[in-house]
Image (tube, rainbow, N blue to C red):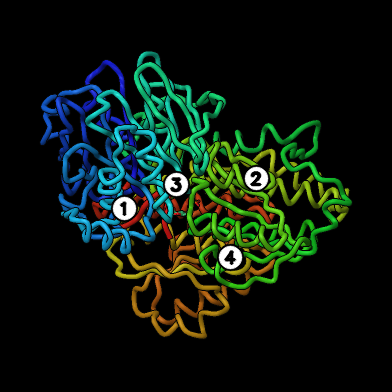
Amino acid sequence: MCGIVGFTGAQAAAPLLLEGLKRLEYRGYDSAGIAVMGGGIRVEKVSGKVEKLCEKTGDGALVPGSTGIGHTRWATHGAPTDLNAHPHLSNDGRFAVVHNGIIENYAALREELTAKGYSFISETDTEVIVHLLEMYDSGDLKATVMKTVARLEGSYALGVLCADAPDTLFAVREASPLILGVGVGENYFASDVTALVSYTKNAIYLDDGEFAELTPKGITIYDCSGKRLDKPITRITWDVEAAEKGGYEHFMLKEIMEQPAAVRAAIAPRLKDGEVKLEEFDLSEEELRQFRKIVITACGSAYYAGCAAKYALEALTRIPVEAVLASELRYGDPLIDEHTLLIVISQSGETADTIAAMKECRSRGAKALAIVNVVGSTIAKTADWTLYTWAGPEIAVATTKGYTTQLAVLFLLAMSMGRKLGALTEERYPALLYDILRLPKLIQEAIDLNHGIPALAKKYHDSPSLFFIGRNTDWASALEGALKMKEISYIHAESYAAGELKHGTIALIEEGTPVIAVCCNEALEDKTVSNIVEVKARGARVLAVAFRGDRKIVSQANDVIFIPRINTLFTPVLAVIPMQLLAYCVARENGCDIDKPKNLAKSVTVE
Ligand code: G6P
């Protein structure tokens, strides 16, 4: 969703801000703008891409000045027009603001400010902030910012520029991420480390209620009462190449190919002396026995990772597991108490619904274990325990390595808990451990086995609708497969539990309808084969995902994509690979904007 950058130093600000905004493009946005101090505040903004803003400003050369703020906007209040784009300017032109999040009390503030004579030119909630700054302006910028922020309800990360303090920026955080970049003779802020990493590796993570004053000479951080705070500098461990395409046509393809290494990074530090060891969640058997149920909550693909891992968690721990969408859980009056282990899954660690669901469950006594990729994110910081997935930066909106590393960590968790609880027996453990150790290699094989996918994409790319079916773990994989297809190719794709077909979806099957059948659960293979036969009898073209060498499936399906054999509980991590590649190739065939699909955002920080 929206992105923020800020810079103050001796260099020209505009080119740096534009570069930062380009690095934030992956988050999803529909307009962009910058404000730079140069004998007064100059604002340039456009609806559309950052590229358009670069053209308008001669790559920043036409906007002189060495202190500024920038923004990519994902429209919430008001259409994606030039006027609604950020930064917004106060009526007297002395304050400029960029904002991520939502000001929930903006309607009342707008009424109050209008009555006082301030004129609004946009439909945004954000514009109230610049008028408040002008109204509270006392000549003491820090006090003005504090008075303004005290009036705001909702979530916000703010960047503030004031004409009276030409080399000063203010950065404010409340329930929306904001990170400070510490440089030499220059300082930065951004809503995402991706925008900072080419300039500095030294970051300070602001917490909710904190704000910072940045000048080229230094950064001062305050709590909400204005008291100075000392906060540690965190070293960013990945470099700029990790956030670049490295020769691939799209980030999504690069990230698909990175999965063997990403999964290796997720599991290697957690396998010690032939045992799964989760130092970050090292509970005793007695402590684990407190949990009478496990509730998994997340959104989008992270939720599907939860659906897929539920089988391993239940099978290996024998604790009942429920996966609930965060947007449902947060308002659901859930039956959750101190005997519930809440597993919160999120690539970004900033998804608004997931954060709210976690808060709700913790307020009912549940303990939260987060599985998160982005270090220092809100979910990672507020959970009781955090297991990082160590996937590195994921830029494509449609997650791939984020999802498979979540699964890998969840499988380790299931094994570790199962061992301690005694539910995972001595006899069963070595085979599972062997499969976990081989996961990176098997993922590579799943990639290598599927060089025929571009040709298959040519067969399937013009279908108006695709159906994905499977049973048990295969159904969970089918859900993620269908989501990948929808997200990036814009083709209607529906996932169904194979046994449910006859209760609805089968009415939609006609001559030539593609059905992707995931058949990697050997115990249920005959059942899924019956479903394949049923849909074929009605004219469907079946593309199966099956274990290499599965003759029964080869004889039944029109086309087959193969994965290497693995324990049934772990199949989702392999079954998804050919479906990621298929979605990618279909979207490419159809000329879609693969890394930045329309209407979607990488990190959904508003409800
Ligand atoms: C958005 C993204 C999805 C992602 C979901 C959850 O909808 O487009 O790809 O799965 O958010 O994101 P999270 O960062 O919490 O995993």
Query: Type of residue at label 1?
Result: Pro
Q: CA distance from mark 2 to mark 3?
A: 26 Å
Q: For the image shown, how many numbered marks are present on the structure?
A: 4
Badges 3 and 4: C-beta atoms under 8 Å apart?
no
The quarter in which the C terminus is drawn is bottom left
State the residue at coordinates (55%, 73%).
Answer: 497
Residue, disc 4: 552
The secondary structure type at the circle numbered 3 is loop
Residue, disc 1: 597
Lateral position of residue 258 relative to residue 463, left or right? right
Q: Nearer the viewer, residue 10 or 486?
A: 10
Q: Nearer the viewer, residue 108 or 243?
A: 108
The secondary structure type at the circle numbered 4 is helix
State the residue at coordinates (41%, 85%).
Answer: 507
Quadrant in which residue 394 is drawn: top left
Which of the two labelled residues, at mark 2 and mark 4, occupies the earlier sequence position? 2
Which of the two labelled residues, at mark 1 and mark 4, occupies the earlier sequence position? 4
Is 75 placed above or below 322 here? above
Q: CA distance from mark 2 to mark 1?
A: 28 Å
